[in-house]
Image: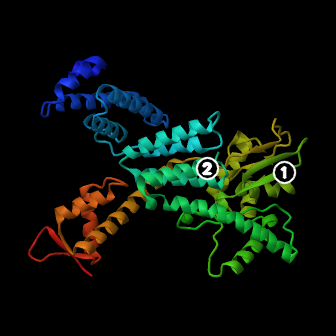
Amino acid sequence: CKEMVEQEKRKDLTNLYILLKPIHKGLDTLVKEVENHIKQQGMQSVLTLQNDPAFVEAMLRVYHKFKELICDVFSNDQVFTGALDKACSAVINHKPQNSRTPNRSPELLAKYCDNLLKKSTKGVGDVELDEKLSGSIIIFKYLDDKDVFQRFYSRMLAKRLIYSQSASMDAEESMIARLKQACGYEFTNKLHRMFTDVSLSLEHVTNFVNYLKEKNENLGVSFNILVFQAGAWPIMQQNNITFHIPQQLEKSVHLFEEFYNKKFNGRKLTWMQSLSNVEMKLCYLRKSYIVTMSTFQMSTLLPFESANSLAFTDIQTSTNLPEKELVKQLQTLVDTKILNTENNSVTEKSTLKLNLAYNNKRTKFKIVAAIQKETPQEVESTHSSVDEDRKLYLQAAIVRIMKARKSIRHINLVQEVISQARNRFTPSIPMIKKSIETLIEKAYLERVPGTTDEYSYIA
């Protein structure tokens, strides 16, 4: 039996299936062998791709191959389909033994979707894109840590929307509809709100332009704005960097705040300058260039309007950017050869000079800001925010159950919490116990006097 399965002898397996099917528990050994074989094939195919989004397509090839085999050889028997599901789930959620690092499948799947939905996708037609997104949902359904995927996906979606990198809004909405179908409205609620914010922002821009006409004001620059609801976007507000807004933008910022406060009394605007972009025209070279860069990079270049060479400290005084952030922004401009400095390395003692011999084949190009690239710190903060969300989710689930039941035994409570959380993640028993202890401390529930394993709800 094992040899037949390993060599995938279809005719022999079909005959064996026909013989064993009528026998009570006759298929058990064959099902187990098929499951182990699929698992082994899956592990081999993704072994070298553990840090690569291409693991998704490798896993889908294994899935489709064995789905077809089960359909052809075992007449699509449910027990073999169940074996395929178990094997795929084991491979996708595999964690090396004694390893503390989290399983990377949710993050890699989010990156795979990000690559598909970005403008840079070359030669992928609508039909092929739709097929690939459908395939990603197959892998998504096998994930244990769906909430980790959601965090990574929402952060990548935010970047695509902020930097206008989405290849197709229809494809974006189609993907969210698929996720909603797989996990329910609560799972995609924030993603829907992000789209709503983008469409409302277009209205804000139109209304703002009309407001300027009424006041007979001219900004002197083309000004576009995105207004986000703080709770819907995965943006860390505590890391928001403030700086001296360049004089050229002061009027725009002041007038928009005035317009917005008149329209929405009581709402507070927080400017996320680190996420903003500008188009800047360089006119000091042989030919003019239009460069898309971050607002911070623009603010570091503007002081060069009155000098060809500036000390790091002068630029810092002008921009009021923190030293670490200023080094990062200037280093990007040195790397792109727009500025020059000794040894091509920026420090607080550097002197920066305009590169007057700068040349580029393109007259219109983009400097990718560091904020647009994924950093290890971002990955780490995503995982830690998922842990915090899980604690709150478990506490909310326990309170819901206790409200309905009034009193319940420990083992039954744990089982109900696991079944409620299964759609998002698989909680560990210690995590549930910790949540119960927290709620006892907060006086939401108490142990029933005279018992060790029963809790009652405190109204």
Reading the image, the residue beneath label 1 is 281
Residue type of the residue flagged with mark 1: Lys
Q: Is residue 402 left or right of residue 345?
A: left
* Image quarter of residue 226: bottom right
Whether residue 419 is visible here, answered yes or no, is: yes
Which secondary structure, mark 1?
strand
Residue 60 — which label? none
Question: Which is more toward the observer, 434 or 354?
Answer: 434
Reading the image, the residue beneath label 2 is 170
Residue at (45% x, 53% y) in the render: 181
Question: Which is more toward the observer, 244 or 411?
Answer: 411
Residue at (70% x, 40% y) in the render: 343
Residue 141 point in image, percent of width and height: 39, 46
The C terminus sits in image quarter? bottom left
Mark 2 surroundings within 10 Å by alpha-carbon count, few (fewer than 14), some (14 through 19), many (20 or more): few
Between circles 1 and 2, the one closer to the viewer is 2
Residue at (85% x, 76% y) in the render: 214
Residue 150 sits above or below residue 37 on the image: below
Mark 1 surroundings within 10 Å by alpha-carbon count, few (fewer than 14), some (14 through 19), many (20 or more): few
* Image quarter of residue 432: bottom left
Residue 52 point in image, percent of width and height: 48, 36
The N terminus sits in image quarter? top left
